[in-house]
Image (spheres, grey):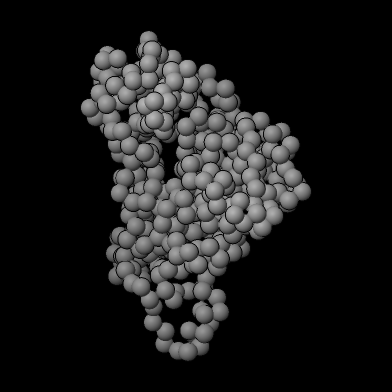
Amino acid sequence: MDISYIINELGEEREKYFNAVAPPIIQTSNFVFNTVDDMRRLFEDEYTGYIYTRGLNPTVDILRKKLAALDEAEDCLVFNSGSSAIYASVMANVKSGDHIVSVNKPYTWAQKLFNNILPNFGVTTTYVNGTAVENFEKAIQPNTTIIYLETPNSWYLDLQDLRAIAAIAKSKGILTICDNSYCSPLYQKPITMGIDIALQSATKYIGGHSDVVAGVLTGTTAMMKKIFETEFCTAGTGISPFNAWLLIRGLRTLPVRLQQITANTGKVLAFLQQHEKVEEIIFPFDKSFPQYELAKKQMGGACGLLSFHLKVKKIEDIVTFCESLKHILMAVSWGGYESLIIPGCASVQEQDYDINKKSQRMLRLYVGQEEPEYIINDLQQALNII
């Protein structure tokens, strides 16, 4: 299906809404029934119609159709955050006594789910280095029900071979879940590579303007309905119609924004590669990246997120560098219009600074949509200070 058609037309049904170019925001809590039979039918299967916006809503459904099509999936659910999408995808598919194999260093809140919440229900997790397929196979136990992936992950940008891991999982009847937030559906489609559930933080590239928090799951209709009838409605984790409308608006410009971000990233990468104070750059489409060939094979692009290490004598120099930036903002997340940076040392206390720990010298940079010279000049002036 053509991307332009998906973004601009699929699911719109403008004739229902006075032929308005932009879809309306159906901002309602509940929906009216004309007959008792109609009400009874939907009470029996809420996934087929509109009762209460905690479940389904027409504005949200337009977004669901578009996101499912972009992922080449049957169906989609949209959540009020990426972490709630992670939570629902896992909790709907485990029971007491089950085991999960997860890639190491997943998103913080996924890791907290595995480490702090699931053990209370008798569910255990084994973490593996995801760069080697055999590590997953070795970690599988008789009670393994989920393999959890995140490729690339958002700090070290490690990749997992989705096709190979999906094949192993299917041969053993294990469900696969992949966090695709780094790439967006335009640059990577896990479902087409055999993954059962693709998830992403729509806060990032789908929204694109740093003004909405949302999460997405795509997969088969049967799987989405299962999650809807258990975690989605029970926990009340659905997205609001207004935020869904913002995501629809964000989708309109997604291809153009990704093109600009990718072009900017190439120029910023070239600047960092030649700078004497940069020790190492981590970026999937850098030819020196250890998994460069896999990146070319399963990713259509790498967008704007990269990590790098500076040559410094003390961690305080990293702090000085970050606090000297005038335009690049120190903040979490990525995918918006603005360039962002996070220092690894922000996760430790000052008394624990250790220059020998590479993780504390690491910086994660998101290259936004500003003019590339604007970003590069800011990096240069901050590097001159340290």
Locate residue 313 relative to residue 337 in the image: left or right.
right
Residue 71: image x %, image y %?
52, 49
State how many labels appear: 0
Locate residue 52 relative to residue 99 in the image: left or right.
left
Could you tell me which residue is drawn at 38 percent across and 12 percent down? Answer: 313
Could you tell me which residue is drawn at 56 percent across and 79 percent down? Answer: 44
Q: Which of 105 and 207 is in front in this view?
A: 105
Q: Which residue lies furthest to the top in this view?
A: 276
Locate residue 120 relative to residue 31 in the image: left or right.
right
The quadrant where residue 61 appears = bottom left
Could you tell me which residue is drawn at 64 percent across and 35 percent down? Answer: 128
Residue 20: image x %, image y %?
29, 64
Q: Residue furthest bottom?
A: 36
Residue 116: image x %, image y %?
54, 48
The quadrant where residue 316 appears = top left
Residue 211: image x %, image y %?
30, 49
Q: Can residue 379 be seen in this view?
A: no
Locate residue 384 relative to residue 190 in the image: left or right.
left
Quarter of the image where the C terminus is located: top left
